[in-house]
Image (tube, rainbow, N blue to C red):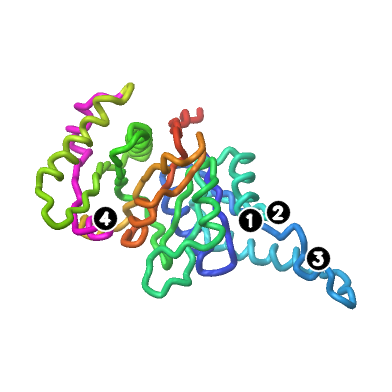
Amino acid sequence: MRYVVGYAANARGGDAINLAVALARRQGATLDLVMVMPEDSPYNGVYPPVSGIGDILAEQISTWIDEGLALIPEDVPAQAHIRRGESEAEALIAAAEELGAVLLVIGASSTGLFKRFSIGSVASALLHASTVPVVLAPSGYSRTEPITRLTCALGTRAGAEDVLRTGLAMAKQRCLPLRLVSLVALGPGDSTGTVDEAQAHLRSVAETSQNLDPDDLDKPEIDVVVGQGRTIEDAVDGLNWKKGEILLIGSSRLAHNKSIFLGSTANRILRALPVPMIVVPRNFEFSIPEASS
């Protein structure tokens, strides 16, 4: 099993490495640290021409990626790759596909003063085009211990069954407790009946899903929760988040098949989310790798 880590020589790159280590531990996963070198040097066209500037840039990137590898503990196997590309996001997606990665891990931008997640241009491109599940680390993420719980957010639109199947498979593979969450924004005059409907929806998703038994939701390691608040942000903030937890969410119905598109609700969730987020492509099928002999 391989995880591609989109590395940058800044705090965002360190956040991505920390989260990738936490995900890889106890999974037998290998980290592929990928740094993208611009296809066209920013020094092209400089007059007078600067001799050897391409070699200098390549040497600097090699130094940076070696520094990134040094951040990964010895118990997590890792290797480095330098790719060229006009688009960093496209180069990362291509690397993940070529290497057979099951996750693409990146860090959030650190430009937001009060936000845990501030989506930069690379993250935005990945969250609207990647064919591989994208994992986003919050700014300042420092935990490297293994993940402790998986929370799966299930919407009311088509595609919830795919997210549920993925959540169950990932929790089983990682031997993690699973929390299934439906978020409800209660405006003025709304009743608790809305919450009851959301609770029923979580179970109806399982009932209508192929190869899923609704009784699976009653297992001790699976918790069914409805988060409610005046807004979606309030509902997210009101949930009890554990240290080492991660949220799994599906793509918008606007996404192309087998591709990611971060919808408006997911964007609102990010505003209040205190833990990392995994966004899976539309119609994504998660398979548990067979144990090597």
Q: Residue at x 21, y 32 (%)?
A: 203
Looking at the rendered image, the disc whose residue lies closer to the viewer, 4 or 1, is 4
For the view shown, which residue lies furthest in the bottom direction?
Answer: 48
Dot 3 amino acid type: Gly
| Crowd class of label 1 (few under 14; some 14 to 19; many from 20; radius 10 Å) | many
Contact, CB < 8 Å: mark 1 with mark 2? yes
Give the residue pinned by disc 1.
88
Which stretch is magenta?
A: 212-235
Calculate the distance from the C-alpha at mark 1 to the C-alpha at mark 3.
Answer: 18 Å
Q: Amino acid at mark 1?
A: Glu
**Residue located beneath label 2 in the image:** 85
Mark 1: secondary structure: helix
Answer with mark 4 or mark 1, whichever residue precedes in sequence: 1
Camera-nearest label, 2 or 4: 4
Q: Nearer the viewer, residue 6 or 73?
A: 6
Q: Say which label, 2 or 3, has the lower sequence index.
A: 3
